[in-house]
Image (tube, grey):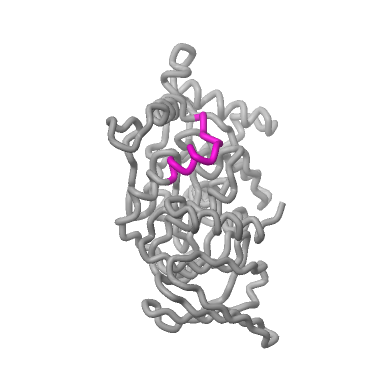
Amino acid sequence: MPVLTAYFDVSDVSFLLDKGTGEYEFSHFPYAYSVEAFSNQCTQEDFNKAVIEAVLKEKKIKLSSCDILVGGFLEAPKVGLETKLSVNLLSILHTTDPFYPFIVNNFSVVTKDAVLSFENCPKKSPGFEENEYDEIGNLSIYPQISPIDIPSVSDMDRNIIEKAKNVNFGYLPQMPIVFAGSRFSRPKSIDYLDYILALDLVRNQGIYNLYLDRKNAVVLTTMLKMYKKDIEANPLQYTEPLGTLVNSPGDTECLVSSEVGTGQFFDVKKDNIFLVPADLSGQETVSVKNILLGSVKDFVHGGKMGLIVDTREGKDPISDNVRVFNDCVRQISLCTPR
């Protein structure tokens, strides 16, 4: 029997269809229920039901022949249908080992260790322009509308980073870090701002492999595993590998070695971000020497940005430092040519 797994985020809905053949089909609905936008037409339950029915109709699957699994931010919503599983986001995240997901939307970030959010409509304070209040208010009322210009996206990301900067998250170097949620699944996203937000959210010292999950695969496959214990679905195969991050505040020496004996040495001064293109072969290693990390060695798994060495000491948002931001964007563009 087919299984449709639905994850309702703040501004969109993600789906995973398991037809029982071992292959999985992902899809995306770029809207979510808003009282202000839709209450004169339908309830949230009616809206969610209609979305699920529309997806099944598009897939040419009868509702009576399909099991429905539902998850949501932060609680699973009512969908007006019989469901085999209804689960909240925190319960999903606590069963995602060995992955460490960051679920991010316009106003919050959720992990296994924390639920962080800033005020949707903050009180007037120094530093806020009048149009910024209007923009934040509109995003609160109409969550399906996402900013697409660089200044607005940077401002939203900065609020998230500031909220998360003093939190001691429990991820470890051997745990792949996956960034998901409507912040990354929305259409017309600015790729390099997505990558920069990911770098800003990883604050612990160490070497980490980063992945961008635009399908919310880590959430959807985990829900499916909660219902079907015997399935083997690795969500990383549906993600976008970003690269291997060396988080080493202060001056850092690195040696990248290949399996055939060639090597590349470079020295990154403090308060910089340095990128080295690396493919996904996993055949290179990086040896790092830093006053805080000591001497460590790990494989370079590669990805969109390759090997990233972040030597910032203060860990303020990258966009706060024009020099670092522009240099980071330039290097990303060189590593990810269009």
Instruction: Tell me where residue 166 sits by quadrant.
Output: bottom left
Vertical order, 29 against 259 (above or below):
above
Whether residue 58 sits left or right of residue 82 in the image: it is: right
Residue at figure coordinates x 48%, y 53% from the top left: 322
Q: Which residues are magenta?
A: 144-157
Q: Nearer the viewer, residue 278 or 6?
A: 278
Residue 147: image location, x then y, percent: 52, 34
Q: Nearer the viewer, residue 145 or 14?
A: 145
- As drawn, the residue found furthest toward the front would be 323
Whether residue 256 sits left or right of residue 36 in the image: it is: right
Residue at figure coordinates x 29%, y 36% from the top left: 126
Instruction: Tell me where residue 255 sits by quadrant.
Output: bottom right
Q: Nearer the viewer, residue 73 or 256?
A: 256
Q: Nearer the viewer, residue 35 or 97?
A: 35
Residue 279: image location, x then y, percent: 67, 68
Residue 155 among magenta residues: yes
- As drawn, the residue found furthest toward the bottom would be 261
- Does residue 22 appear in this view? yes
Q: Quadrant of the N terminus?
A: top right
Residue 300: image location, x then y, percent: 58, 73
Instruction: Tell me where residue 96 sits by quadrant.
Output: bottom left
Q: How many discs appear?
A: 0
Residue at figure coordinates x 35%, y 52% from the top left: 164
Residue 53 among magenta residues: no
Residue 204: image location, x then y, percent: 38, 65
- Does residue 78 appear in this view? no
Residue at figure coordinates x 46%, y 63% from the top left: 98
Vertical order, 218 against 273 (above or below):
above
